[in-house]
Image: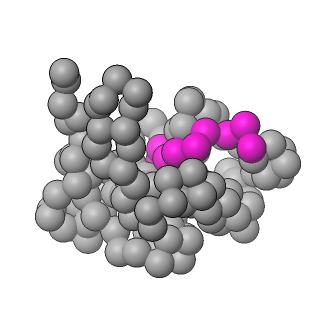
Amino acid sequence: MAELKTKQNNASVRDFLNTVDDKQKRADCKTIAKMMREATGKRAKMWGTAIVGYDVYDYKYESGRSGSFMITGFSPRAQNISVYIMPGFKKFGPLMDKLGKYKTGKSCLYIKRLEDVDQKVLACLISASVKEMRRIYKNT
């Protein structure tokens, strides 16, 4: 069985964020970090080498595979900032309609710049996704 490569570790989140070359992206990430800390009540942890994650949930599949992963997080990528909305977006249609300019993957929200989205709506989306994950996994 393949092991999950992205694991929580003790690397410094502050040091990682300070390596983001683009000054605006670095500031945007710090704002997103504040939103996530407020939504989770938890301090950030590094997951792998490039993801800042908040809180943890434990999962177990019918196959028997189990593990732990972050409830929410983000990563400053070259093209955009990836914001991890772990339950996906189906339940959050009204918020997504008001968010602004973005793209999505299965549980990734891709934004170029924080100014492209409504920050209050983004904070609500993050908070709603955290509540949904805690409801589903009931361990935090």
Give coordinates of residue 92: x percent, y percent: 75, 47
| Residue furthest left as drawn | 10
Q: Is residue 76 above or below residue 62?
A: below
Task: State the quadrant of the C terminus.
Answer: bottom left
Given residues 130 and 11, the one toward you in this image is 130
Give coordinates of residue 119: x percent, y percent: 68, 64
Question: As drawn, is 99 to the left or to the right of 113?
Answer: right
Q: Can the viewer see residue 22? A: no
Q: Is residue 3 magenta?
A: no
Question: As drawn, is 26 to the left or to the right of 48?
Answer: right
Q: Is residue 85 magenta?
A: yes
Q: Quadrant of residue 118?
A: bottom right
The residue shown at (40%, 54%) is 57
The residue shown at (45%, 36%) is 79
The residue shown at (18%, 67%) is 12
The residue shown at (20%, 35%) is 5
Q: Quadrant of residue 89?
A: top right
Question: As drawn, is 46 to the left or to the right of 100?
Answer: left
Give coordinates of residue 128: x percent, y percent: 67, 60
Given residues 81 and 41, the one toward you in this image is 41
Q: Is residue 118 above or below residue 59?
A: below
Give coordinates of residue 44: x percent, y percent: 34, 68
Q: Exactly how many numbered labels are in the figure?
A: 0
The magenta-colored residue range is: 81-91
Q: Can the viewer see residue 75? A: yes
